[in-house]
């Protein structure tokens, strides 16, 4: 079993939370989202992000608008909907509970060494 596979799965599991959180700050263009995720070492490629954005849009958690660009064709900018904000709040609550549970379960491993 390779640790990289497990790391990749863990990152995928929190990607939705991170994407919604980034977009909740301000509307975002996909390459800006990818940049923020790369900065946080949650490396994704466009092929991973676009299907996720589409799923979130279809679930009415995101909305997009087209904006003119000086560097080519118009661009899609995503923003979070009211329903998306409520969903994000629920994800954050779940993340905090999970994070606490994992810390409680692993604290003995890190303090005994």
Image (cartoon, rainbow, N blue to C red):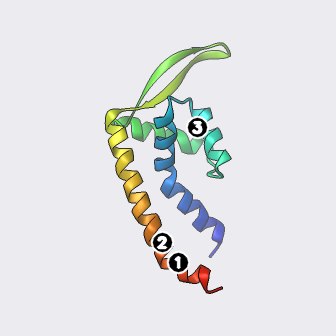
Tell me how far mark 2 sits from mark 1, CA to CA: 6 Å
Q: Quadrant of the C terminus?
A: bottom right
111 vs 86: above or below: below
Provide the residue designation for mark 2.
102
Residue ID at (46%, 21%): 65
Provide the residue designation for mark 3.
33
Q: Is residue 95 visible?
A: yes
Name which quarter of the figure residue 11 lies in: bottom right
Which one is earlier in the sequence, the residue at label 1 or at label 3?
3
97 vs 111: above or below: above
Specify the farthest residue to the bottom: 112
Tell me how far mark 1 sits from mark 3, CA to CA: 31 Å
Residue 91 x, y percent position in the rendering: 39, 52
Residue 55 x, y percent position in the rendering: 41, 41
Residue 3 x, y percent position in the rendering: 64, 71
Q: Quadrant of the N terminus?
A: bottom right
Provide the residue designation for mark 1.
106
24 vs 89: above or below: above
**Circle 3 sits in a helix, a strand or a loop, which is it?**
helix
Callout 2 crowding tier (Cα within 10 Å): few <14, some 14–19, many ≥20: few
Tell me how far mark 2 sits from mark 3, CA to CA: 27 Å
Residue ID at (46%, 49%): 17
Residue 73 x, y percent position in the rendering: 60, 16
């Amino acid at each position: 079993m390779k640790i990289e596979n497990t790391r990749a799965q863990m990152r995928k599991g929190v990607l939705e939370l991170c994407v919604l959180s980034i977009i909740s700050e301000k509307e975002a263009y996909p390459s800006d989202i990818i940049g923020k995720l790369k900065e946080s070492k949650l490396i994704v490629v466009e092929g991973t992000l676009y299907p996720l954005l589409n799923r979130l849009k279809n679930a009415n958690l995101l909305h997009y608008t087209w904006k003119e660009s000086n560097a080519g064709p118009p661009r899609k900018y995503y923003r979070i909907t009211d329903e998306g904000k409520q969903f994000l709040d629920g994800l954050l609550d779940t993340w905090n509970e999970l994070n606490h549970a994992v810390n409680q379960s692993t604290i003995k491993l890190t303090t005994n060494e």
